[in-house]
Amino acid sequence: MKLLVFFVLLSAVFASSIEDLLQEILLADDDVKCGDGNCDAGEIDSFCLADCKDEIKDLVCAAANKHNACGATCPILQQLEPKLYGLGICGQVMTEEQKYSEVCGAACPPPECGDGTCDAGEVDSFCLKDCKDEIKDLVCATAFEKGVCDKKCPVLQKIAPNLYGMGVCGGVMKDSDKYSDVCGDDCPKPRCGDGRCDDGEVARFCMEDCKDELRAQVCAVAKENHACGKKCPVLQNIAPRLYSMGVCGGVMEWTDKYSEVCGDACPDKPMCKDGDGAPWWCRVRHRRWCPWWARRGECDKNPAYMLRCCAGSCNQCPDEDFESELASLLHGDFEEEVAHPPMTNFDF
């Protein structure tokens, strides 16, 4: 009988202990609640700012210090720790404009030029002591992008004045150094066939890299010399040096007309007629002689007359807009007559 009573009492004790344990577990679950003032386990990972702002800030500061980003503003975290950034650090733990050094204090001190580490922001502040290699890389990339690898340092003043103003010439390289000498493969010496039309390659007639640029030059020369309707070999007479570089066969075929290759840059037929928009004394008296005068070079010798009366033959059609057309209609017939070129030795 006593043994039975013992087992009954023991069972009651165990039942009471299990019930208490379950109750404690339930209470513990109720205690883990964001906003209760306690930074409980798991609340950092769930980004409970209400309870764990200081702990989360410490985590952010440690990450910034690890990546030498103390001198950078908040958004750099997106590159360094995207998962942490995605929790909404910028805007909640710190503002977008704040630097980590301003928020973290001693946990992420501001970069100091000369401490041996190239921290975020020290390239922009031109800290040569810590970031000479990084600054050199930036300079070489800029020189390569602008196609000046075969130029000497001072050209940077024209292509990147802000970078030049930091003292690159004298700090990173000498004034007499070429970028190709300092940068090596990052900014190699221009080479015909490298796919880039570098400075000087048009003059050296590098067809592989500068075909479009050479074509534009040829078209401009053909138009200037009123040869748009002519075939390629005429270049031998009007620009022998350019012809000798192999334009015929390289830029265009021997039988091609410049108008066929150049399009609007050198049209075969003028886009206006001789006498269009010109005073009466042009239209009535001398217009039929315009082509002959143009062949004789009068477009250059007597532009006051030729460009006004013989624009078509000179391939120098004026821009047609409403104001110029209206002015011609209102005043064209009252313009003072200009002396025409001489009419001797006709060769019609």
Image (cartoon, grey):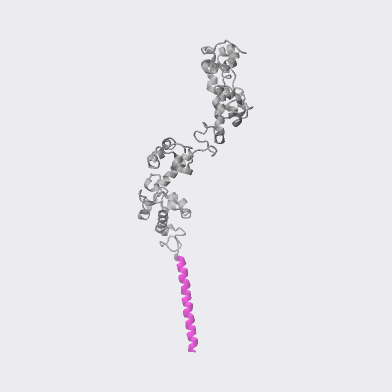
Q: Is residue 44 above or below residue 317?
A: below
Give percent across and percent down for residue 59: 42, 57
> Looking at this view, is 227 or 79 the one in front?
227
**What number of labels is visible?**
0
Magenta region includes residue 71: no
How far from the left and from the top, in percent, is residue 255?
64, 27
Q: Horizontally, is 102 left or right of 188 in the view?
A: left
Q: At x 44% / y 49%, what residue is drawn? A: 76
Position of 257 compared to 52: left or right? right
Most extreme residue toward the bottom, as rendered?
Answer: 1
Give the residue drawn at x 45%, y 68%: 28
Instruction: Give the extent of the magenta segment.
Output: 1-30
Q: Would you say residue 320 is visible in this rendering?
A: no
152 shown above or below 102: above
Q: Quadrant of residue 37?
A: bottom left
Residue for point 48% across, 75% down: 18
Q: Is residue 9 magenta?
A: yes
* Relative image position of residue 229 (x, y in whole percent): 61, 23
